Amino acid sequence: MITLTHYLVLSALLFTIGLAGIMTRRNVILILLCVELMFNAANLAFVAFAKSLGDPSGQVIVFFVITVAAAEVTVGLAIAILMARRLSTLNADEVSLLKW
Amino acid sequence: MVTGFPVALAAWTLLLAPLAAAAGIPLLGLHRKRLSASLAIGGLLVPFACACWLLLHTLQGSLHLPLEVKVSWLLLPDLAIPFGVLIDPLSLLMSLIVTGVGSAIFIYSTGYMAHDSGYSRYFTMLSLFAFSMLTIVLANNWLELFIGWELVGFCSYALIGHWFEKPQAADAGKKAFLVNRVADFGFMLGILALWAHSSPLAAERTLNYQLLQTRLPSLLQSGWLSHETLVLTGLLIFCGVLGKSAQMPLHVWLPDAMEGPTPVSALIHAATMVAAGVYMLCRNFWLFQGAPAVLETIAWVGGATAFFSAALAVVEPDLKRILAYSTLSQLGYMVMAVGLGGHVAGMYHLTTHAFFKALLFLAAGSVIHGTRRQNIRELGGLRRSMPWTSATFFIGALALCGFPALSGFFSKDEILVLAHEHNALLYWIGSVTAGLTAFYATRAWCVAFLGQAPEHLHAHESPPVMLIPLVLLSVLSIVGGYLGIPAFLGEPAGAFHWDVAATSLAAIATGAGLAWLIYRRKAIAAEAIARRCAWLHRLLVNRYFFDDVYTWYVEQVQQRLIAGACALFERFIIIGLAVNGLAWLTQLAGRAIRRVQTGRVQGYVLGFCCGIIALLYLAGRF
């Protein structure tokens, strides 16, 4: 029997993996992937709660999150492409133009 | 018996027709002279007809006054002010003056302003002026009165400065506006004080005249409105009269207002503007009645204005300014009458004064129109070249002096009788002023209209459109004393006092005789008198130095002291401390905090996560 707790643990695991990836990786594309992982962790938690509480609004929110995530990826990938073209690198540490 | 709809319609038309004209002219006839003039004149003749209709029914006994029509207008919590029209004998009489004398002036203007480039603008403002005055006259509450009061101030500003390309005219307009602003501030405070004390219950406070009038005794009895507050309120409200009716010491704007077109001067001096102050005093006489101290002040201010401004007219060479000082002096009479407890006498004099002063101004305008000059020393012998103008001016001057059987005689006599009964000193001041009035009127007449015409003076008589209003107003100036105006206002004229009439006639004869000897017979040289009393002459020529004192105050005290202190405050406190200091602080903080921006994304994420955890922790605790 898979209970709510199982889903939540999985969601927490995914979230932590994503967060750790963001912290440790230097490649912009990998960072973006990790952000996606965190989004989906949150989505999983939402649907799990929706199912267990019988409230469909959790599922509705997931659609919104997917939409926002799509928009975010668009912008993020555009930045990554510009970085590759202009600065010939995908290393986040080397991009510090906005620093003081 | 007439009631209901026709009466309400007449009342609203009486108030709103000039406003419709004022809106219609800029919308339809900005470049159509004939249309704008007809709209303006029609917009005043229609209310005149309404007022006549109401008067007719009142006299026949088929209409009961007072009559109040109103619509709900300002609705706020604890404050509901209906916009209304109050028609009683007083407001009916005043609206007849405004619309009747106003119509004559409007018609005259079509001739006087015929070649003016701002023709339509002129008639727009004229209509708005009439509407504002009617708002004051017909208002049923203080707020509505105040709106009209301020609108009148604005219209006078625009009309005095009609020829705004002339700096003196623009300045005169500004001066009129600013002086009235000072006075109106006091007036507004007075109205607010009255409102605050109109009832102990916030929801029942009112500005309605009739309600206030009925409540006043109980308010005084219950102690909610103390006697001191009543005196203070009365004085503050009288402050507004000081400005609008040009009483000393705020009279300085009126002589300068002569820069405007002459029909405007006639309108300001006869039917609108300056009459507003006296009318307001009469309208709310019940308020002042309870405070003898206020009435006393009013009487003395009026008496002083009457005397001192009549003296100014004696040395003034400008024909229009002579009339302006004469208005000041006559207004002083009216205010004095109200102060002595005779609001009917004051209103009576206001009415006859409206007739003969409009006549005098229009005749003076006709002189200016026909000769392009207004200094009486450059004029002369107009009696032959401008017979109609001269004849009507003569009638006006006689009425102004109070020549027996003309309108001015009766109304001035009422006031002097009143003064005779109540205050001996004011009575003598009033009688001497009557002598001075006769003196300056005779002087103007002798110098400008009699004698030899100076060379290069090409005078020609004005067109009929200007002469017909003059003739109409002359008729009114003659018969104004027989119309039974005091009886209409509910206080029939008292018995005729031979002693008072004899004294004032003696004063008039002395004044006129002296002026005749000096300026016609040349038996006494005016220059010799001026030399003999050099200090007095200097005082009068410089108008008691009122303008100099005000200029000194504005330039030295206001501009240098107060404005200088404000400038220092701004430079050091506002700019130095507040603006630049804040910028410096922000810069300092930025320099310290920007170390956080390392440029490492992972660092930011770490900080972000720590923040989230801290927030979650806090959310869990509270």
Image (spheres, rainbow, N blue to C red):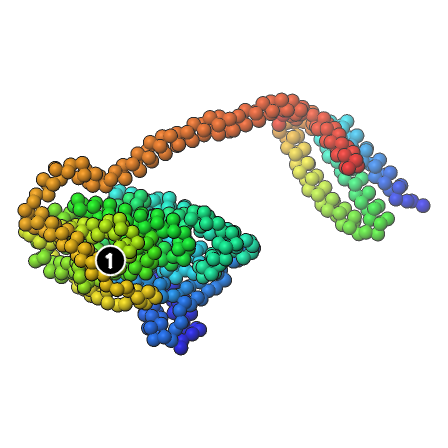
Residue B418: x and y in percent read 28, 57
Residue A59: x and y in percent read 79, 49
Q: Nearer the viewer, residue B571 or B273?
A: B273
| Residue underneath mark 1 | B412
Residue that lies at the very extreme toward the bottom in this rendered image: B1
Residue placed at 26% from the left, 68% from the top?
Answer: B483
Chain under disc 1: B
Residue placed at 34% from the left, 56% from the top?
Answer: B341
Q: How many marks?
A: 1
Residue B424: x and y in percent read 27, 51
Residue B34: x and y in percent read 26, 62
**In this rendering, position of residue A83 left or right of residue B526:** right
Residue placed at 19% from the left, 55% from the top?
Answer: B504
Q: Compared with residue B176, is residue B619 higher up or lower down, i.e. above or below?
A: above
**In this rendering, position of residue A49 left or right of residue B142:** right
Q: Compared with residue A10, is residue B331 higher up or lower down, i.e. above or below?
A: below
**In this rendering, position of residue A77 left or right of residue B139:** right
